[in-house]
Image (cartoon, grey):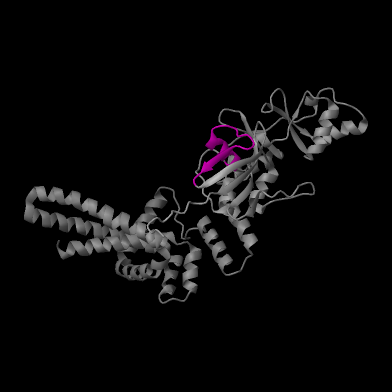
């Protein structure tokens, strides 16, 4: 391959990689590199001060390199192979530019942007100087064309992105500038919009609800025992939620020694949300509609669970406990290789605390996983195996599991019969 073609392709690789390196680095990371005082790092101010000039130089340089490579390849192929060689060389060069001059260097540059930043800006500083007259002419034409179409050219670089803020949080945490708890809270805010209601809801089997048809005295007793301020009310089945009863509204009648003619008169309409709804959307709806509780339904419209504003806020600030909350230990480790676990523990939390790995499916809790594994609602004393663990149902009723025992099975030590005494 002629030297001119090789040089053109190398230049194409350089321009493609430099473009990705610089555009991958936000202002915060660039400033961090500049403050490191490494040799050549000050040149990155060119990117901060005039990103449009650098980008235009890269695009002009890359275009010239690719055109030159195409021209020289066609010339070389036609000279030695005629018309057929010209067609074949065009197809081959297109493949080479796409794979080796675009995809490969850009992928590598994306993953090593910080490491390559100074090299990239040193090279681009040189090419900015080489192409400056041509770049200014083309940028002038471009600005005129944009204005003619009614657009506006901004001299300001990109605004701070979410990735940059996350990067700043990580750096601050490593340098001890913020406390670990605050770092966790800030990180939770960014993950907030990715979490669905299904991941945090109270499952249907754990919902405390009351039947609208029961006597007033029994209803009052159940509500007081529940210690909740709002209780879902169902009609015929416990998944047929028809309203939300506020405890304070019921207590008003009790204080007066009266009974409501129909409980439906004092309960509010339930607010239904799909399992797939994201937490940031639901929190916004809670604020707009001034509600604190929603009933979660699956894709078929069947009650799947319940979510409160407290559940949502706990995803940001962590567990919120009041004077009525009992301290429940979801997992204990009574002896080596043995875990006694609350069935409603989230699998992600269990994996973090024990190092166990569970397959991902529609279930979110350990109880859901075991029910799926056994293909039924297990009874107390039922035993199943998962990998090299024995899982025993310690407590359950006809509807759900409460507690499970996970025990690592000892691996049998092979007996060495190679020697006889």
Considering depth in this image, is 65 or 256 the residue closer to the camera?
A: 256
Q: Is residue 338 left or right of residue 39?
A: right
Q: Is residue 39 above or below residue 107?
A: below
Estimate the x, y position of residue 293 in percent, counting from the top left: 70, 38
Considering depth in this image, is 10 or 139 the residue closer to the camera?
A: 10
Estimate the x, y position of residue 354 in percent, counting from the top left: 57, 53
Estimate the x, y position of residue 272 in percent, counting from the top left: 64, 32
The number of numbered badges drawn on the structure is 0
**Which residue is rendered at x = 86% and y = 34% of the image?**
251
Considering depth in this image, is 283 or 34 the residue closer to the camera?
A: 283
- As for residue 54 lying within the magenta part, the answer is no
- As for residue 367 lying within the magenta part, the answer is yes
Q: Is residue 71 left or right of residue 287?
A: left
Q: Is residue 92 left or right of residue 148?
A: left
The stretch of residues the image draws in magenta is 364-387
Estimate the x, y position of residue 132 in percent, counting from the top left: 33, 67
């Amino acid at each position: 391959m002629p030297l001119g073609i090789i040089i053109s392709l190398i230049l194409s690789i350089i321009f493609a990689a430099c473009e990705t390196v610089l555009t991958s680095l936000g202002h915060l990371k660039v400033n961090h590199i500049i403050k490191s005082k490494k040799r050549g790092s000050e040149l990155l101010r060119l990117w901060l001060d005039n990103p449009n000039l650098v980008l235009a130089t890269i695009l002009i340089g890359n275009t010239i390199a690719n055109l030159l490579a195409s021209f020289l390849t066609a010339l070389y192929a036609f000279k030695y192979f005629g018309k057929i060689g010209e067609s074949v060389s065009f197809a081959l060069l297109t493949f080479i530019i796409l794979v080796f001059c675009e995809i490969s260097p850009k992928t590598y540059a994306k993953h090593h942007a910080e490491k390559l930043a100074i090299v990239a800006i040193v090279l681009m500083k040189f090419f900015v100087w080489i192409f400056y007259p041509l770049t200014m002419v083309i940028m002038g034409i471009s600005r005129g064309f944009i204005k003619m179409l009614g657009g506006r050219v901004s001299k300001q670089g990109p605004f701070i992105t979410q990735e940059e803020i996350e990067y700043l949080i990580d750096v601050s945490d490593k340098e001890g500038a913020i406390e670990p708890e605050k770092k966790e809270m800030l990180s939770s805010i960014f993950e907030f919009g990715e979490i669905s209601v299904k991941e945090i809801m109270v499952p249907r089997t754990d919902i405390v609800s009351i039947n609208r048809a029961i006597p007033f005295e029994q209803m009052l007793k159940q509500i007081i025992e529940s210690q909740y301020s709002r209780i879902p009310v169902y009609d015929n089945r416990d998944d047929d939620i028809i309203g939300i009863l506020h405890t304070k509204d019921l207590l008003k009648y009790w204080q007066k020694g009266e009974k409501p003619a129909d409980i439906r008169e004092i309960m509010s309409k339930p607010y239904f949300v799909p399992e797939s709804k994201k937490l940031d959307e639901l929190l916004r709806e809670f604020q707009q509609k001034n509600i604190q509780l929603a009933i979660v339904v699956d894709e078929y419209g069947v009650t799947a669970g319940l979510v409160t504003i407290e559940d949502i806020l706990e995803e940001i600030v962590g567990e919120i406990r009041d004077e009525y909350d009992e301290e429940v230990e979801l997992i204990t480790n009574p002896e080596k290789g043995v875990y006694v676990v609350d069935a409603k523990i989230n699998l992600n939390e269990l994996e973090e605390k024990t190092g166990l790995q569970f397959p991902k499916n529609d279930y979110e809790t350990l109880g859901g996983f075991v029910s799926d594994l056994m293909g039924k609602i297990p009874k107390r004393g039922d035993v199943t195996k998962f990998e090299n663990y024995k899982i025993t149902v310690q407590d359950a009723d006809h509807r759900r599991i409460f507690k499970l025992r996970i025990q690592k099975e000892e691996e049998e030590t092979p007996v060495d019969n190679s020697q006889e005494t």
